[in-house]
Structures are given as C-alpha cells and as structure tokens.
Image (spheres, rainbow, N blue to C red):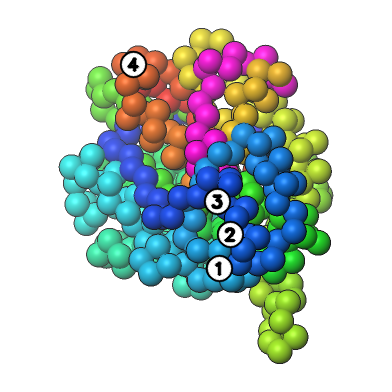
Amino acid sequence: MNAYVVQTDLQVLGTGECFPSLMLDSEELVARFRDNLGFESAPLAKRIAKTMGIEERRLVRDLAEPREKPRDNESNPDLAAGAVHQALGEAQIDAQALQYLIGHTASPHTFIPPNVSWVADRLGYGGPYGEFRQACTGFANALVMSNGLLSVSGEAPVAIVGSETGSVFCDLGNLDADRGQFVNAVQMGDGSAAVILKRANGDDTSRIELVFFGQLKTGAVPGFTMSEGASGDPALERRTLHFDHDFNSVRSEGPELFARGLATLKQLDIDINAMDWIIPHQANGRIDQVMEEALGIPREKVIVDANVTGNLGSAAIWVSFHRLRTSDRIKRGDRVLVLGAEATKYMFGGFIYQH
C-alpha cells in the first residue's frame, strides 16, 4: 500500500461555507465572454458546460477584462474567513479558542506571506497557523496535520479552511486559441468552506474515523499546473501566473485516482457498500454518472454539487461535506466516504465520517 492511512477520532464541531456575490449561469458566462472579450466560440463553450453538467458558478471577478483582481471584500482570505466564521458559529466558540488555523489553497491572495495569515487577520485570530499549497486533496493533508495536533495538545479545537479564487488566475485574453484556459473558464468556480475539529470524547457523534492520502506514481507529468507565462501585453515587461490545464490527461487519468482510493480501503477490509453516502471530488456536475459507470457506485449514493458551484478545487470537498452534513438527507449514524482526487501530480485521499 503506497498510501498513508491513520485511524482518527475527531469530532466535527461545526462547518461553514462562503461564496462571492456574483452568480452566473452558463448562458450569462458565455455572454460576458462574447460581449466583453470578443470571444468567438460561444457555441462550443455552451456544449462544454452542458457536457460537464455545470449549470452555474459564483465568481469573485466580473469578466469585464482579460485579467482582473477580485471585487472588494471578496478576495481569497475574505471568503476563507467568512467560512471559518460560519463554522465557529455552529461550534459556538470564538476564533481565539482555536489552538491552530490550517488553510489549503491553490490560488492564494499572496504566496508570501501565506494566504492563511490574511485569514487570521480578518478573524482577529492571534494564534499559530499553517498552510498547504495544494488543490483538490489539500483537505486530506490538513486532516492528517489536525489529527497529530489534537492527539498531543489537549482539548482546544483546530480549524481547517479550503478556499479558491481560481478565476483570478484565468487569463481570458486568448480564449479562442488556448483551450486550457477555455475549459478552465467554463468549469471553475470560486468559494470556500471550513470545518472545526476537536478530539472526540465518549459518545460524541459527528466523527471522522479514518484519513488516507497517497499518490499514483512518481514522475507523473502534471495534469494541472500554475506557472509563469507572458502577460499577453507587450507593453508590460513582466510575467504573470496562470493555470495550465492538460485536460486530456486529466480525463484519462482521473478515474484511476478514485479507484486507488477505493483500493486503499479494500486493503483495510472496509466495505464500501456499507457506506450511506459518497462525496467524490466535484470535478464536474455529472460526477455521480462517472462514479457509477467507472466504479460501480450507485449514483443515488453520490453527492453532486459541482452542477451549481463549478469545480472549486481545494474548497470542493468541504463545501459538499458542509452541505450534506447540514441537510435533512443525512441521518444520525449514517456513514460517509469522502474520495478526493487531484490532477496536479495525481494524488488521492479521503476520509470516513459517521454522522
């Protein structure tokens, strides 16, 4: 087994989410591309959105220019702090009660200082913090770190927040020629979600029982990278960061990431069929169909949120976890399997939760 697996006993005290104000359905998204950017492939964009099952998403930018900053009060740290604040509200504690604040994101407000430092500022949190520069499996490493902290350092809780504002790193200046940017612009959304954890005691419900994380292989060519590239403006003698997306490789390799997660659990003699709910990474709005066809998981068990959020990267798992956990669908005693899949260097991870 090439995955790290740890038995945990973490109680979930609260969860929360925070999204930017602008919601665009696919028709409105393509209209802004066309009207503001001279985009000429509107029919193709609509077909891609339909194929991916993404009907709407929320964005921190207006799509009025090829490159834009987030709107005021809707930066990555703003969304992250909003999600933590909501989770603290359910937990009925103040930020100062936390022993640690952990963030994970692939689209930070600044690379140095870390994104989470700005989150701490907005929360008025004066304690220690740490950050993973990781996308769709950041939640798994954050849980491993949290479990270690809570195993040795008493009763004070830990907060984890996943947050993405990837639309800011999408260069819309050449959508017709750059299919990677084109697919990113159609599928991605912005948002954040958080969870508050403590060490479980006695008969506490709402527990995370097991966490795992691994990779498919070393030396893999990344399916998704953030790299330096020309700004696109000859008058600007600088380089800008943007996402590069090898979507054909992601499409071919992605299902194996979920399969490897299931194989890890099988080696632990965990019966997947005994799970009441499955939360896979929300790569698209048809993830239930993908899970059923590729892995034989009944689609009625599979949680789907990407149809109304887009692909939220590092925030996706916590958003779906929060929405299921606070819905009337889940019942006390239900068990939830979370399966993360990250195409940056083909990593997988997950956890088991009992409500």
Q: Give the side of residue 352 with respect to residue 118, left or right.
A: right
Question: Do the numbered discs 1 and 2 sit on residues whose CB atoms are within 8 Å?
Answer: yes
Q: Give the Cα separation between the discs numbered 3 and 2.
A: 6 Å
- Upstream in sequence: badge 1 or badge 3: 3
Question: Do the numbered discs 4 and 2 sit on residues whose CB atoms are within 8 Å?
Answer: no
- Tell me which amino acid carries mark 4: Lys
Looking at the image, how many numbered discs can be counted on the residues?
A: 4
Question: Do the numbered discs 3 and 2 sit on residues whose CB atoms are within 8 Å?
Answer: yes
Q: Give the Cα separation between the discs numbered 3 and 4.
A: 37 Å
Q: Position of residue 351 (x, y in %)?
A: 50, 30
- Upstream in sequence: badge 3 or badge 4: 3
- Upstream in sequence: badge 1 or badge 4: 1
Q: Give the side of residue 188 with respect to residue 196, left or right.
A: right
Residue located 69% across and 66% down the image:
38
Residue 76 lies in quadrant: bottom left
Determine whether 130 is above or below 87 in the image. below
Q: Secondary structure at mark 4?
A: loop
Q: Secondary structure at mark 1?
A: loop
Q: Which residue is mark 1?
A: 64
Q: Give the Cα separation between the discs numbered 1 and 2.
A: 7 Å
Q: Give the Cα separation between the discs numbered 1 and 4.
A: 44 Å
- Tell me which amino acid carries mark 2: Arg
